[in-house]
Amino acid sequence: MDIKQFEEFLSDKEKLDILLVEDDLFSRKLTETYLSNYFNVDSTANGKDAVQKASTNAYSVILMDINLGKEMNGIETTKKIRELEGYNEIPIIAFTAYAMAGDKEHFLSSGFTHYISKPFTRKDLYQIMLEALKKVK
């Protein structure tokens, strides 16, 4: 996959709304920069705000960090979002530094539809977004 394929896939579509849940400011800003030309990116740093945003907005894809600090982690947040009307089938991508053997499988069995480990390249991010969006459209 190259960026051209990603752009071609999105070319005939309106900018989709996505939610980015990431507590690290640098990672959040970098990811927003990568995605803002193609999507309306709404972001937050914690699970509580993510659940609130998801309850009042219709996102096409959610990028969810796992380690969100002291309150809800990404798995707990994903479970709460999955309980919201309209979010049963929405792609939620585990977006995390957890990359040990078995981590991907654990997240995929915990309500996530896709997984990307940090650090990632722009191409990696576009590839996982394309995979997720193909399930939506």
Image (cartoon, helix red, strand yellow):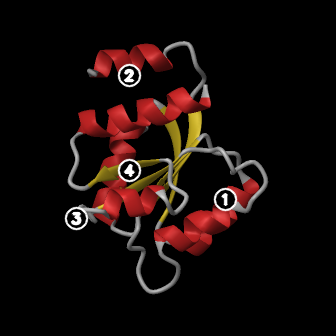
| Residue for point 43% across, 32% down | 131
What element does badge 4 sit on? strand
Q: How many marks?
A: 4
| Gap in angstroms between the C-alphas marked 3 and 1 | 25 Å
Give how far across and how far down residue 27 sits, in percent. 30, 58
Mark 3 or 1 closer to N-term? 1
Q: Please tell me the numbered disc located at residue 82.
A: 1
Mark 4 or 1 closer to N-term? 1
Give the camera-side residue of 136 and 19: 136
Residue type highlighted by circle 1: Arg
Mark 2 or 3 closer to N-term? 2
Q: Quadrant of residue 38?
A: top left
| Gap in angstroms between the C-alphas marked 2 and 3 | 28 Å
In contact (CB < 8 Å): disc 2 and disc 3: no
Q: Please tell me the numbered disc located at residue 6.
A: 2
To which residue does mark 4 refer?
A: 115
To which residue does mark 3 refer?
A: 100
Q: Residues within 10 Å of mark 2 (few under 14, many from 20)?
A: some
